[in-house]
Image (cartoon, grey):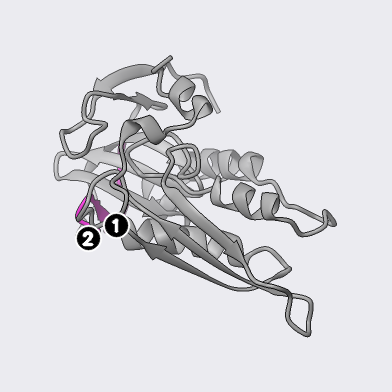
Amino acid sequence: MTARSLYLVPRVDRSPLSSVFSVMQFNEELTLVRDTEATVIPAGDTQVIPSGTHAVISQALGGTVTIRTDLGLFRLSSQDWDALGAETQVQLDQVAKEAESAPGDVPFSEELVWEAMKGCFDPEIPVNIVDLGLIYDLNINDSDTDGRHAVNVKMTLTAQGCGMGPVIAEDAKKNIEALGAVSTAQVDIVWDPPWTPHMISDAGRQKLGLE
């Protein structure tokens, strides 16, 4: 992928992170080549963005892409990256491939589950949900007769009522269930205690330039 300058833009005031700046990873204006169904951020609803709409990629992490348009902010899943043009799709596929970290024959452990959840991101913040401090509880049940485990997670969001909550929780569920030793995963959203920026890990704070 050709190098593109990084720059900062203010976040919209929707959460306790409203004073934090999001790192922009791309700045090239693209044009959608077909009508595209996308997830509205932060409402979580789906909307069809018409062909010809101009868009800028603001984040490409965890197998999803966030784009900014005159219609608002949207999340595109990998099956719709072709709407951004063939060249951009190839570039995004390469970014996703390089980010993959298959556990292979590594023995199952709690650490593997945490690493799986680190592949999930808030679509507006370039930090994974673990380092954002959104994961409140992880419980791994004893293995069943097939040697597989049921996993239960409690997570929160940076802002109560955010419509993206179920989407992010589903991302975490899929990533955990992709581990061969996991039979099923349940991810519940909770609000107690309320999330604050103080819950961000040192690594997350460094990523956001808070150190």
**Mark 2 Cα shell of 10 Å, populated few (<14), some (14-19), many (≥20):** few
Say left or right for 74 vs 198. Answer: left
Q: Percent position (x, y) of residue 169?
A: 41, 60
For label 1, the SS is: strand
Whether 45 is drawn above or below 24: the answer is below
Q: Percent position (x, y) of residue 159?
A: 24, 46
Residue at 33% x, 59% y is 190
Which residue does the numbered mark 1 point to in the structure image?
Answer: 38
Q: Nearer the viewer, residue 193 or 75?
A: 193
Q: Percent position (x, y) of residue 184?
A: 59, 75
What's the amino acid at mark 2? Answer: Val
Q: Nearer the viewer, residue 168 or 1?
A: 168
Which mark is on residue 175? none
> Is the Cβ of the residue at disc 1 closer than 8 Å to that at disc 2?
yes
Q: Percent position (x, y) of residue 133?
A: 43, 41
Residue at 39% x, 18% y is 210
Q: Is residue 79 visible?
A: no
Q: Nearer the viewer, residue 176 or 139?
A: 139
Q: For the view shown, which residue lies furthest in the right direction? A: 105
Query: Which stretch did the figure color magenta?
Result: 30-46
Sequence-first tag of 1 and 2: 1
CA separation, marks 1 and 2?
6 Å
Q: Quadrant of the N terminus?
A: top right
What's the amino acid at mark 1? Answer: Ala
Which residue does the numbered mark 2 point to in the structure image?
Answer: 48
Whether 130 is drawn above or below 171: the answer is above
Q: For the view shown, which residue lies furthest in the front direction? A: 193
Say left or right for 184 vs 154. Answer: right
